[in-house]
């Protein structure tokens, strides 16, 4: 049994993570702004803080000690530095939920040029210890943050790696799918358009990308808090998926036909599939497998997710 702190555990796969930790017998404390209700009742402790506001996290966790912290809300180097200072050496490790977007070569900004990245990116191709970060950029501006999401995550990784006084895990999570509670709406985008016989736009000769089931993503985070793993780990199903695979799952679940239209200049089209890439953009999962935590292939979970999602409406 361990004392685990989860920052951002009240929605999507954060709730799945908290439930897994509780089922495993851990004592869980969630740090929350208190704006979103959660289903955990008296089974968790709650600390109130808005981690986007300087000083609130440090005040909330002052004097607290945890075996591990899972930070689901670390989007900027400022948030990373604040977390490192707030917990100091009073956490056994910090697990940061990062993203596949750190490998997006089109989103690199500032002093750090994009490294050579494979279409099936490996963790060692992006070293956070060597990446520059700047806490003076306008990360407090929501528009700036949204426009620089990938860069914010890269700089957060770099800042946490260099400032944390405890071991760090960087969980580079693929596009997360779940049949229920999918606030991104990415799968629903395809389901709705197939049902309404509306076109789904794709890039010409679209590439594939990495997906992961919400249960698998939460399972990795729950495993990481008590394992000996450190450093960056790609969290994804081992088989990259393209827009045609997603549409096929909808077709099989509904008995309807998807209308996919490929366009040479698809960027910005409102009907562009969230899973269409101009070229392959995915992550290798060899490191997770070698650590003893393989992920479920998308080919195994996507059909069931499609059937469940189709029944929800």
Image: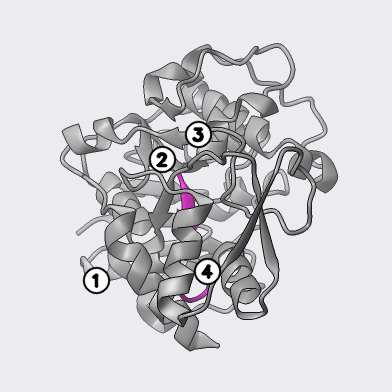
Which tag is nearer the camera, tag 3 or tag 2?
3
Q: Which residue is mark 4?
A: 10
**Callout 1: SS:** helix
Majority SS type along the magenta span: loop
Distance, label 2 to label 4, CA atoms, is 19 Å
Which label is found at residue 280?
3
Please rate how many residues cluster around mark 4, counting C-alpha atoms within 10 Å: few if below 14, some from 14 to 19, many from 20: many
Numbered range of the magenta stretch: 174-183
Q: Residue at x 75, y 44 (%)?
A: 146
The 10 Å Cα crowd at callout 2, few under 14, some 14 to 19, many 20 or more, is: many
**Numbered circle sitting on residue 23:** 1
How far across and down, in percent of the image, does residue 37 sit? Answer: 58, 79
Badge 1 vs badge 4, beta-carbon distance below 8 Å = no
Which residue appears at 26% of the width and 63% of the height? 26
Q: Secondary structure at mark 4?
A: loop
Residue 261 lies, in percent from the top left, at: 66, 54
């Amino acid at each position: 049994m361990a004392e685990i702190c989860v920052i951002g555990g009240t929605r999507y796969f954060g709730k799945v993570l908290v439930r897994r930790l509780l089922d495993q017998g851990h004592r869980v404390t969630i740090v929350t702004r208190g704006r979103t209700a959660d289903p955990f009742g008296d089974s968790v402790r709650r600390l109130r803080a808005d981690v986007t506001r300087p000083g609130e996290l440090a005040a909330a966790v002052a004097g607290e000690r945890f075996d591990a912290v899972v930070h689901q809300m670390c989007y900027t180097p400022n948030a990373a530095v604040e977390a490192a200072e707030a917990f100091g050496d009073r956490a056994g490790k910090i697990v940061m939920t990062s993203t596949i977007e750190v490998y997006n070569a089109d989103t690199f900004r500032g002093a750090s040029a994009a490294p050579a990245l494979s279409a099936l990116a490996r963790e060692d191709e992006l070293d956070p210890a060597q990446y520059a970060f700047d806490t003076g950029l306008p990360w407090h501006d929501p528009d700036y943050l949204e426009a620089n999401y990938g860069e914010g995550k890269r700089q957060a990784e770099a800042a946490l790696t260099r400032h944390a006084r405890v071991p760090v895990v960087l969980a580079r999570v693929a596009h997360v799918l779940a049949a229920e509670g999918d606030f991104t709406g990415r799968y629903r985008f395809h389901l709705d358009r197939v049902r309404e016989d509306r076109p789904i736009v794709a890039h010409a000769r679209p590439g594939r990308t990495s997906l992961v089931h919400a249960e698998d993503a939460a399972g990795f985070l729950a495993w990481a808090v008590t394992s000996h793993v450190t450093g960056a780990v790609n969290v994804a199903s081992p088989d990259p998926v393209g827009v045609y695979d997603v549409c096929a799952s909808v077709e099989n679940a509904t008995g309807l036909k998807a209308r996919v239209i490929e366009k040479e200049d698809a960027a910005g089209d409102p009907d562009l599939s969230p899973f269409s890439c101009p070229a392959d953009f995915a992550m290798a999962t060899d490191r997770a497998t070698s650590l003893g935590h393989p992920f479920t292939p998308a080919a195994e979970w996507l059909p069931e997710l499609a059937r469940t999602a189709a029944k929800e409406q």
